Image (cartoon, grey):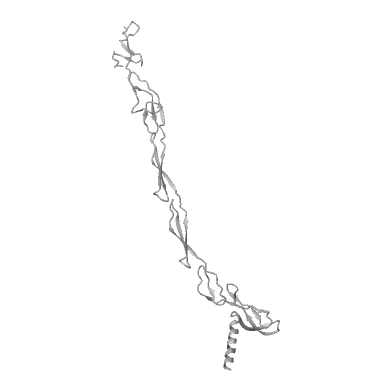
Amino acid sequence: MKKRFLSVLLTLFMVLMMLPTTAYADTAYCDICGKEVDIDYSNYEYLNAQFHQRSGYCQECGSFVAKPRSEHNWSGTATCTSGQTCTVCGGTSNPRGHAYESTVTIEPTCTTDGVRTYVCKNDSSHTYTEPIPATEHNYESSVTTAAACTTDGVRTYVCKNDSSHTYTEPIPAAGHNLEKAEKKDAGCTKDGYEAYWRCQTCKKLFSDEAGTVEIINPIEIKATGHDLKAVKRKEAGCTEDGHETYWRCQTCKKLFSDAAGTVE
Protein backbone atom coordinates (compact mmCIF):
# COMPACT_ATOMS: atom_id res chain seq x y z
CA MET A 1 0.00 0.00 0.00
CA LYS A 2 2.80 2.36 0.89
CA LYS A 3 4.65 1.59 -2.33
CA ARG A 4 1.49 2.21 -4.36
CA PHE A 5 1.01 5.63 -2.73
CA LEU A 6 4.57 6.61 -3.48
CA SER A 7 4.10 5.48 -7.08
CA VAL A 8 1.01 7.71 -7.46
CA LEU A 9 2.86 10.70 -6.01
CA LEU A 10 5.77 10.13 -8.37
CA THR A 11 3.44 9.91 -11.37
CA LEU A 12 1.64 13.11 -10.34
CA PHE A 13 4.96 14.90 -9.91
CA MET A 14 6.09 13.83 -13.38
CA VAL A 15 2.82 15.05 -14.92
CA LEU A 16 3.25 18.42 -13.22
CA MET A 17 6.81 18.63 -14.48
CA MET A 18 5.60 18.07 -18.04
CA LEU A 19 3.12 20.95 -17.87
CA PRO A 20 4.38 24.24 -19.53
CA THR A 21 5.99 26.36 -16.89
CA THR A 22 4.94 29.49 -18.77
CA ALA A 23 1.22 28.94 -18.26
CA TYR A 24 -0.75 30.52 -15.44
CA ALA A 25 -4.16 29.19 -14.29
CA ASP A 26 -7.05 31.58 -13.53
CA THR A 27 -10.83 31.82 -14.08
CA ALA A 28 -12.86 34.03 -16.42
CA TYR A 29 -16.21 33.99 -18.22
CA CYS A 30 -16.13 32.20 -21.60
CA ASP A 31 -18.72 33.45 -24.13
CA ILE A 32 -18.47 30.19 -26.06
CA CYS A 33 -19.03 27.95 -23.06
CA GLY A 34 -21.42 30.44 -21.44
CA LYS A 35 -19.95 30.01 -18.01
CA GLU A 36 -17.01 30.77 -15.74
CA VAL A 37 -14.15 28.55 -16.79
CA ASP A 38 -10.54 27.93 -15.93
CA ILE A 39 -8.15 29.96 -18.07
CA ASP A 40 -4.68 29.12 -19.26
CA TYR A 41 -2.48 32.18 -19.65
CA SER A 42 0.60 32.37 -21.80
CA ASN A 43 3.81 34.09 -20.75
CA TYR A 44 3.80 37.86 -20.49
CA GLU A 45 4.79 39.54 -23.73
CA TYR A 46 6.22 43.02 -24.26
CA LEU A 47 3.49 45.39 -25.50
CA ASN A 48 5.00 48.87 -25.38
CA ALA A 49 7.28 51.02 -23.27
CA GLN A 50 4.73 51.06 -20.42
CA PHE A 51 2.88 47.74 -20.51
CA HIS A 52 3.24 44.01 -21.08
CA GLN A 53 0.34 41.60 -21.68
CA ARG A 54 -0.61 37.92 -21.73
CA SER A 55 -3.22 35.96 -23.68
CA GLY A 56 -5.85 33.80 -21.92
CA TYR A 57 -7.57 30.72 -23.43
CA CYS A 58 -10.53 28.68 -22.16
CA GLN A 59 -9.36 25.31 -20.83
CA GLU A 60 -12.60 23.66 -22.00
CA CYS A 61 -13.11 24.97 -25.56
CA GLY A 62 -9.69 26.50 -26.23
CA SER A 63 -11.12 29.81 -27.44
CA PHE A 64 -9.45 33.15 -26.76
CA VAL A 65 -10.94 34.77 -23.67
CA ALA A 66 -8.89 37.82 -22.65
CA LYS A 67 -5.61 39.69 -23.08
CA PRO A 68 -5.05 41.66 -19.88
CA ARG A 69 -2.12 44.09 -19.61
CA SER A 70 -0.12 45.44 -16.69
CA GLU A 71 2.77 47.82 -16.19
CA HIS A 72 6.35 46.69 -16.45
CA ASN A 73 8.37 45.91 -13.37
CA TRP A 74 11.67 47.45 -14.38
CA SER A 75 14.95 46.28 -12.93
CA GLY A 76 18.42 47.71 -13.27
CA THR A 77 19.57 51.15 -14.43
CA ALA A 78 19.17 52.49 -17.94
CA THR A 79 22.36 53.70 -19.62
CA CYS A 80 23.08 55.67 -22.76
CA THR A 81 23.07 52.52 -24.88
CA SER A 82 20.95 49.99 -22.95
CA GLY A 83 17.62 50.15 -21.12
CA GLN A 84 16.17 48.50 -18.01
CA THR A 85 14.86 44.92 -18.08
CA CYS A 86 11.33 43.96 -17.04
CA THR A 87 11.45 41.11 -14.51
CA VAL A 88 8.06 39.86 -15.72
CA CYS A 89 8.17 39.84 -19.54
CA GLY A 90 11.91 40.20 -20.10
CA GLY A 91 11.40 43.24 -22.32
CA THR A 92 13.77 46.18 -22.25
CA SER A 93 13.11 49.89 -22.03
CA ASN A 94 14.61 52.46 -24.35
CA PRO A 95 18.16 53.52 -23.50
CA ARG A 96 18.62 57.03 -22.17
CA GLY A 97 20.60 58.05 -25.22
CA HIS A 98 23.63 60.29 -25.27
CA ALA A 99 23.56 63.90 -24.06
CA TYR A 100 26.82 65.29 -25.33
CA GLU A 101 28.45 68.55 -24.30
CA SER A 102 31.47 69.83 -26.20
CA THR A 103 34.56 71.87 -25.39
CA VAL A 104 37.51 72.99 -27.50
CA THR A 105 40.43 70.94 -26.22
CA ILE A 106 42.95 72.09 -28.84
CA GLU A 107 42.61 75.51 -30.45
CA PRO A 108 43.06 75.59 -34.24
CA THR A 109 45.89 77.61 -35.73
CA CYS A 110 46.41 79.09 -39.18
CA THR A 111 47.96 75.87 -40.45
CA THR A 112 46.82 73.06 -38.11
CA ASP A 113 43.38 71.76 -37.16
CA GLY A 114 42.11 72.03 -33.62
CA VAL A 115 40.10 69.44 -31.67
CA ARG A 116 36.59 69.63 -30.21
CA THR A 117 35.86 66.93 -27.61
CA TYR A 118 32.35 65.68 -26.84
CA VAL A 119 31.59 64.07 -23.44
CA CYS A 120 28.23 62.48 -22.60
CA LYS A 121 26.63 63.99 -19.48
CA ASN A 122 24.97 60.64 -18.75
CA ASP A 123 28.22 58.66 -18.90
CA SER A 124 31.56 60.46 -19.07
CA SER A 125 33.23 57.34 -20.49
CA HIS A 126 31.35 57.97 -23.74
CA THR A 127 33.39 60.50 -25.69
CA TYR A 128 34.37 61.33 -29.24
CA THR A 129 36.27 64.10 -30.98
CA GLU A 130 36.01 66.01 -34.23
CA PRO A 131 38.50 68.31 -35.94
CA ILE A 132 38.14 72.08 -36.00
CA PRO A 133 39.41 73.26 -39.40
CA ALA A 134 42.51 75.45 -39.44
CA THR A 135 41.60 79.13 -39.50
CA GLU A 136 43.95 79.92 -42.42
CA HIS A 137 45.99 83.10 -42.58
CA ASN A 138 44.47 86.57 -42.25
CA TYR A 139 47.22 88.91 -43.35
CA GLU A 140 47.49 92.67 -42.92
CA SER A 141 50.27 94.58 -44.67
CA SER A 142 52.25 97.73 -44.06
CA VAL A 143 55.13 99.45 -45.84
CA THR A 144 58.19 98.84 -43.69
CA THR A 145 60.69 100.36 -46.15
CA ALA A 146 59.52 102.94 -48.66
CA ALA A 147 60.63 102.51 -52.25
CA ALA A 148 63.08 105.11 -53.59
CA CYS A 149 63.72 106.15 -57.18
CA THR A 150 66.40 103.50 -57.72
CA THR A 151 65.99 101.05 -54.79
CA ASP A 152 63.10 98.73 -54.00
CA GLY A 153 61.05 99.13 -50.84
CA VAL A 154 59.60 96.39 -48.63
CA ARG A 155 55.98 95.56 -47.78
CA THR A 156 55.58 93.27 -44.75
CA TYR A 157 52.57 91.01 -44.18
CA VAL A 158 51.67 89.88 -40.63
CA CYS A 159 48.92 87.35 -39.88
CA LYS A 160 46.33 88.73 -37.44
CA ASN A 161 45.68 85.20 -36.12
CA ASP A 162 49.35 84.51 -35.36
CA SER A 163 51.89 87.33 -35.52
CA SER A 164 54.73 84.83 -35.94
CA HIS A 165 53.46 84.13 -39.45
CA THR A 166 54.94 86.83 -41.69
CA TYR A 167 56.32 87.32 -45.15
CA THR A 168 57.61 90.23 -47.23
CA GLU A 169 57.44 91.33 -50.83
CA PRO A 170 59.41 94.02 -52.67
CA ILE A 171 57.92 97.34 -53.69
CA PRO A 172 59.50 98.13 -57.08
CA ALA A 173 61.61 101.27 -57.37
CA ALA A 174 59.62 104.02 -59.06
CA GLY A 175 62.45 105.44 -61.17
CA HIS A 176 63.34 109.12 -61.42
CA ASN A 177 60.70 111.69 -62.28
CA LEU A 178 62.94 114.01 -64.29
CA GLU A 179 62.16 117.56 -65.32
CA LYS A 180 64.47 119.41 -67.69
CA ALA A 181 66.08 122.77 -66.84
CA GLU A 182 66.97 124.49 -70.11
CA LYS A 183 70.49 125.68 -70.87
CA LYS A 184 71.37 129.23 -69.78
CA ASP A 185 74.00 130.97 -71.87
CA ALA A 186 76.79 132.82 -70.11
CA GLY A 187 76.81 136.63 -70.33
CA CYS A 188 79.69 139.06 -70.33
CA THR A 189 79.89 139.12 -66.54
CA LYS A 190 77.53 136.33 -65.40
CA ASP A 191 78.14 132.60 -65.68
CA GLY A 192 75.60 130.36 -67.40
CA TYR A 193 75.04 126.59 -67.20
CA GLU A 194 74.38 123.61 -69.41
CA ALA A 195 70.94 122.01 -69.57
CA TYR A 196 70.30 119.53 -66.74
CA TRP A 197 67.49 117.35 -65.33
CA ARG A 198 66.10 117.46 -61.77
CA CYS A 199 64.21 114.51 -60.22
CA GLN A 200 60.98 115.80 -58.71
CA THR A 201 61.00 112.92 -56.19
CA CYS A 202 64.54 112.71 -54.81
CA LYS A 203 65.66 116.21 -55.99
CA LYS A 204 68.90 114.86 -57.46
CA LEU A 205 70.43 116.53 -60.54
CA PHE A 206 71.53 114.72 -63.69
CA SER A 207 73.43 115.89 -66.74
CA ASP A 208 71.59 113.50 -69.07
CA GLU A 209 67.94 112.88 -69.86
CA ALA A 210 68.21 109.17 -68.89
CA GLY A 211 69.23 110.11 -65.34
CA THR A 212 72.41 108.03 -65.38
CA VAL A 213 75.02 110.74 -64.66
CA GLU A 214 74.39 112.43 -61.35
CA ILE A 215 75.84 115.90 -60.74
CA ILE A 216 76.01 118.03 -57.62
CA ASN A 217 75.45 121.33 -59.40
CA PRO A 218 74.61 122.30 -62.98
CA ILE A 219 77.63 122.30 -65.32
CA GLU A 220 78.86 125.88 -65.35
CA ILE A 221 79.46 128.00 -68.47
CA LYS A 222 81.93 130.75 -67.58
CA ALA A 223 81.16 134.41 -68.32
CA THR A 224 82.85 135.52 -71.56
CA GLY A 225 83.86 139.02 -70.43
CA HIS A 226 83.17 142.20 -72.42
CA ASP A 227 84.07 142.37 -76.07
CA LEU A 228 85.09 146.06 -76.02
CA LYS A 229 85.66 148.25 -79.03
CA ALA A 230 86.98 151.81 -78.66
CA VAL A 231 85.06 154.78 -79.99
CA LYS A 232 87.53 157.64 -80.48
CA ARG A 233 87.24 161.05 -78.94
CA LYS A 234 85.15 163.56 -80.87
CA GLU A 235 85.94 167.24 -80.57
CA ALA A 236 83.06 169.59 -79.88
CA GLY A 237 82.07 171.96 -82.71
CA CYS A 238 80.26 175.27 -82.74
CA THR A 239 76.88 173.71 -82.60
CA GLU A 240 77.55 170.02 -81.84
CA ASP A 241 78.79 168.48 -78.63
CA GLY A 242 81.76 166.21 -78.74
CA HIS A 243 82.70 163.27 -76.44
CA GLU A 244 85.71 161.64 -74.89
CA THR A 245 86.96 158.30 -76.04
CA TYR A 246 84.81 155.41 -74.75
CA TRP A 247 84.50 151.66 -75.23
CA ARG A 248 81.38 149.74 -76.36
CA CYS A 249 80.86 146.02 -75.64
CA GLN A 250 79.92 144.28 -78.85
CA THR A 251 78.03 141.60 -76.87
CA CYS A 252 75.97 143.41 -74.25
CA LYS A 253 76.18 146.89 -75.93
CA LYS A 254 77.15 148.55 -72.65
CA LEU A 255 79.44 151.61 -72.70
CA PHE A 256 82.55 152.07 -70.57
CA SER A 257 84.89 155.02 -69.99
CA ASP A 258 87.95 152.80 -69.63
CA ALA A 259 89.52 150.14 -71.77
CA ALA A 260 89.22 147.57 -68.93
CA GLY A 261 85.44 147.94 -68.91
CA THR A 262 85.27 148.63 -65.18
CA VAL A 263 83.54 152.03 -65.25
CA GLU A 264 80.22 151.75 -66.98
Relative horizontal placement of residue 263, taking residue 73 as reference (left or right):
left
Residue at 57% across, 90% down? 6
Give the position of the N terminus as an image quadrant.
bottom right
In this view, the residue in front, 170 or 144, is 170
Question: x and y percent of residue 50 in the render?
Answer: 58, 74
Residue furthest toward the top?
238
Question: x and y percent of residue 127 in the render?
Answer: 47, 63
Residue at 47% across, 56% down? 131
Relative horizontal placement of residue 110, taking residue 95 as reference (left or right):
left
- 90 is higher (above) or lower (below) than 255: below
Q: Quadrant of residue 93?
A: bottom right
In this view, the residue in front, 188 or 248, is 188
Give the position of the C terminus as an image quadrant.
top left
Q: Quadrant of residue 13?
A: bottom right
Question: x and y percent of residue 29 in the render?
Answer: 67, 83
- 196 is higher (above) or lower (below) than 86: above
- 25 is higher (above) or lower (below) than 210: below
Question: x and y percent of residue 41 in the render?
Answer: 62, 80
Residue at 41% across, 39% down? 170
In this view, the residue in front, 33 or 110, is 33
Relative horizontal placement of residue 190, taking residue 79 as reference (left or right):
left
